Image (cartoon, grey):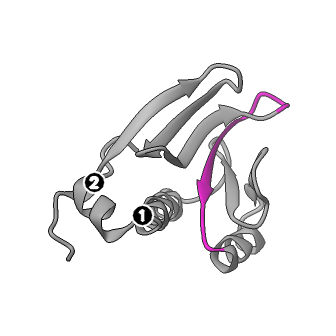
């Protein structure tokens, strides 16, 4: 997660979450659910999240998040690594794209104008 361009990590003590952010916007969170199972929560386009939830029982609506846009993956579950990596990449890109071109350029170091 920290290898993603512009990513930084913080710890939200009151939630017990390790958050991964671009500027002030979260693209991933690692925590445990109420059963103490480790999960990663990622933002996806609703259609992508819905599709993945139908394919993998270990991908569920986002834990303590908007259930349409956020998806939680049980880290000890049966989701292939390549699917999880694709979800991470899409979440990062979705958050990056939410910024203005100027901010995107500051984050990536690219001239996007």
Question: x and y percent of residue 65 in the render?
Answer: 75, 50
**As displayed, is residue 21 above or below residue 89?**
above
What number is the disc on residue 99?
1
Residue at image point 74% right, 68% down: 53
Q: Mark 1: which secondary structure?
A: loop
Q: Which residue is mark 2?
A: 107
Residue closer to the observer: 81 or 33? 33
Q: Quadrant of the N terminus?
A: top left
Answer with left or right where residue 55 lies relative to residue 94.
right
Q: Is residue 38 left or right of residue 5?
A: right
- Callout 2: 10 Å neighbours few (<14), some, many (20+)? some
Q: Is residue 57 above or below residue 2?
A: below
Please provide the residue range marked out in magenta. 34-45
Looking at the rendered structure, the secondary structure element under dot 2 is: helix
Measured as percent of width and height from the top left, residue 12 is found at 60, 26
Quadrant in the rendering for residue 68: bottom right
How far apart marks 1 and 2 lie (CA) works out to 10 Å
């Amino acid at each position: 997660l920290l290898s993603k361009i512009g990513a930084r990590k913080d710890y939200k003590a009151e939630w017990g979450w390790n958050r991964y952010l671009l500027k002030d916007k979260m693209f991933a969170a690692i925590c445990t659910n109420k059963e103490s199972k480790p999960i990663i929560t990622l933002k996806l386009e609703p259609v992508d999240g819905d599709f993945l939830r139908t394919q993998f029982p270990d991908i569920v609506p986002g834990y303590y998040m908007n259930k349409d846009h956020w998806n939680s993956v049980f880290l000890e579950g049966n989701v292939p690594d390549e699917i999880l990596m694709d979800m991470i990449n899409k979440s990062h890109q979705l958050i990056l794209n939410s910024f203005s071109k100027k901010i995107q350029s500051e984050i990536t170091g690219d001239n996007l104008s």
